[in-house]
Image (spheres, grey):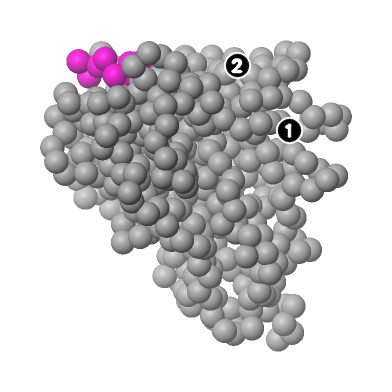
Amino acid sequence: MPADEQRRRIVSCARPHECLRSSLLPVRSTDLVSRLRAGGLMPGAFADREWRVVSRTRNPWGRVPLTDGGRHLEGDAQQYMLRLAAQRELPDTPSRRHHFVPRSYLREWSSDGKRVWMLDTADHAVRLVGIADACVQENFHRVVGPGGVPHNRVELMFGVVDAELRRVQRLFNTLDDPEELRFDDLLGLGVSMAMQRMRTPQTRRLQRQYNRWLVAQDPEHFASIDNDPDAPHREAGFHTRSLFEAMWGAADVFITRQIEVWTDPAGRFWTCDAPVLVPFERSERPDLQLAPYILWPISPYRVVALTHDLVGEKAVIKVADGKMLGLVRDAVEEGRERMIFASDTQRSRLPVAKLFRRRAQSVLTCADHTPEGDPVPPPGCCVKWAVGLRAEPGVHLCEQGLHRDAPRCANWSETG
């Protein structure tokens, strides 16, 4: 078989949905929604699988907690989408400083509402920084419109996202009676966590890593998402478009879980610049659907934890023990991109002396079978993209002549 044909085969055998379930999004797709469904992030992917009942639990919401990737929205969720759509018709905003973690979110860790303690894991310095200067990048959401003119209306759309995130954050920070939660609150929690997880520089950096490898394998079928002088906003355009298209499919993964609210009266929870966390297991970020926990610190005193331990209640409020505190702390340290934030009382406990040599990196491996166990006849293999806790990205592929070297891998670990 000619080498080019072999390479086309390996690219077609590669399963971008493994990336989806592990962390992010496909890099090339004319229909992201169908690819997400194929990857298991939307209910349509369940049709071809065999299922058996292993347990039964009361559904406390009185309705099925799925939106079918946003196809079935009503009430507050529908109004949320209408508000998002309305922003596209507004005049462009002059704002160039775009926050990828909302300022209102970080204020929960601030004693004066203006500044917060931050550990920069790159230079090991603890600083009291203005919230306006935290988790912000110039033109991070600036994209090119249909007429070829760059604009910042995406920043207006994120204003709607941030407002809903803040509502949900306040709701769960003050929640005493879980029975007061509405179905719309469940959807609001799911979409807020999904959007926050996908909108960070870490997500963009991991997308870039995977895309560069794909382009090296088959440049005729995979287009680069890197910026260049002629397209300085290409990467932002791909990132923002894909996350808005994927938002409800990703939210569906979150809202099928049990909500737990972990409380710590001593206020020892930290957060970071990638605050929706899937804890690493043996240095690999687990499949999103199989991960035991998805964690979102919402204040020094509370963390929303989504688990598989369904108990038939809308939410369960638990006082955090040492294991929970350690799990959140490790998840923040390992899951951060660069910055860790803490309250005044926790400032002295920030790990200034720790050498943060590892962070989330792309890891590519291949096997002679698909994730479902189906064999891939030679010459061929199935490439899995996962996210590992490493100093550098990892590429561990077969030597059948199916894979091209990716010469730009030397730049994979650059900051997003």
Residue positioned 64% across, 19% down in the render: 156
Could you say whether the residue bearing mark 1 is in a helix, strand or loop?
strand
The residue wearing badge 2 is 82
**What x and y, as percent, mark residue 43?**
46, 42
The mark lying in front, picked from 2 and 1, is 1
- Quadrant position of residue 7: bottom right
Residue wearing tag 1: 143
Q: Position of residue 138 (x, y in %)?
A: 66, 31
Q: Nearer the viewer, residue 412 or 187?
A: 412
Assign a secondary structure to mark 2: helix
**Quadrant holding the N terminus:** bottom right
Q: Residues within 10 Å of mark 2 (few under 14, many from 20)?
A: few
Magenta highlight on residue 40: no
Question: Residue sitting at 29 percent across and 19 percent down?
Answer: 173
Q: Residues within 10 Å of mark 1 (few under 14, many from 20)?
A: many
Q: Is residue 72 visible?
A: no
Q: Quadrant of residue 95?
A: top right
The reply to whether dot 2 and dot 1 touch (C-beta < 8 Å) is no
Q: Which residues are magenta?
A: 168-179
Query: For the point 68% across and 31% down, which residue is it?
Result: 139
